[in-house]
Image (cartoon, helix red, strand yellow):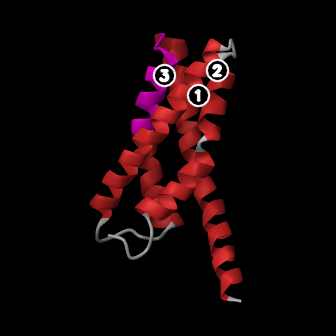
């Protein structure tokens, strides 16, 4: 029975994590398309700028709500999270550029680039940033 409890906990965390990811995705999508459309910022640069904002907001969400790890050691977790966000950004930029090169409209390419990396991000965040007992 303990395996079932662990699985249930993982599923619950993934669903709550997804809520934070949606918040981050909305920030990324709106800021990226806004900067690209209104300021003519290249999509990859716009996505990079948006992720600085969204990653900080999403860290607070996950630290307090998803993994309930707020408090001692938050700065170390934040640095780890931002390092992971840099890797996530690199993956998203590669996907974004490939999709734009394939003549996909920017609004679709941005959405696909944001969504594709989400599951891997959950796994990495769970194991490397917010795991209980790892401070």
Q: Secondary structure at mark 1?
A: helix
Check whether the beta carbons of the residues at disc 2 and disc 3 lie within 8 A of each other.
no
Question: For this rendering, which residue is in front, 38 or 5?
Answer: 5
Mark in the foreground, 2 or 3: 2
On screen, residue 99 versus residue 49, left or right, reads right
- Please report the residue visible at 67 percent of the width from the left and 82 percent of the height from the top: 3
> Tag on residue 15?
none
Query: Where 67 sits versus 124, above or below?
Result: below
Q: Is residue 48 magenta?
A: yes
Residue lying farthest bottom? Answer: 1
The answer to which of marks 2 and 3 sits earlier in the sequence is 3
- Please report the residue visible at 58 percent of the width from the left and 50 percent of the height from the top: 120
Q: Secondary structure at mark 2?
A: helix
Which residue corresponds to mark 2? 99
User: Mostly what secondary structure, the magenta segment?
Assistant: helix
Query: Where 94 sits versus 2, above or below?
Result: above
Q: Residues within 10 Å of mark 3 (few under 14, many from 20)?
A: many
Query: Where 20 sits versus 38, above or below?
Result: below
Question: For this rendering, which residue is in front, 36 or 11?
Answer: 11
Which residue corresponds to mark 3? 44
Residue 82 placement (x, y as % from top left): 37, 47
Q: Quadrant of the N terminus?
A: bottom right
On screen, residue 103 versus residue 69, left or right, reads right
The answer to which of marks 1 and 3 sits earlier in the sequence is 3
Find the magenta span and give its range. Answer: 40-53
On screen, residue 49 versus residue 66, left or right, reads left
Task: For marks 2 and 3, give the CA distance.
Answer: 12 Å
> Tag on residue 95?
1
Residue 8 placement (x, y as % from top left): 69, 75
Query: Where 122 sits versus 38, above or below?
Result: below
């Amino acid at each position: 029975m303990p395996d079932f409890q662990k699985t249930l906990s993982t599923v619950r965390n993934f669903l709550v994590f997804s809520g934070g990811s949606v918040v981050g995705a909305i920030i990324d999508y709106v800021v990226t398309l806004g900067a690209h459309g209104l300021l003519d910022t290249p999509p990859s640069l716009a996505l990079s700028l948006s992720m600085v904002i969204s990653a900080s907001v999403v860290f607070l969400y996950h630290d307090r709500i998803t993994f309930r790890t707020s408090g001692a050691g938050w700065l170390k977790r934040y640095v780890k999270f931002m390092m992971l966000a840099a890797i996530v950004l690199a993956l998203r930029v590669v996907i974004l550029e490939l999709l734009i090169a394939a003549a996909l409209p920017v609004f679709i390419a941005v959405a696909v680039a944001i969504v594709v990396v989400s599951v891997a991000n959950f796994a990495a965040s769970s194991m490397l940033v917010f795991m209980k007992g790892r401070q």
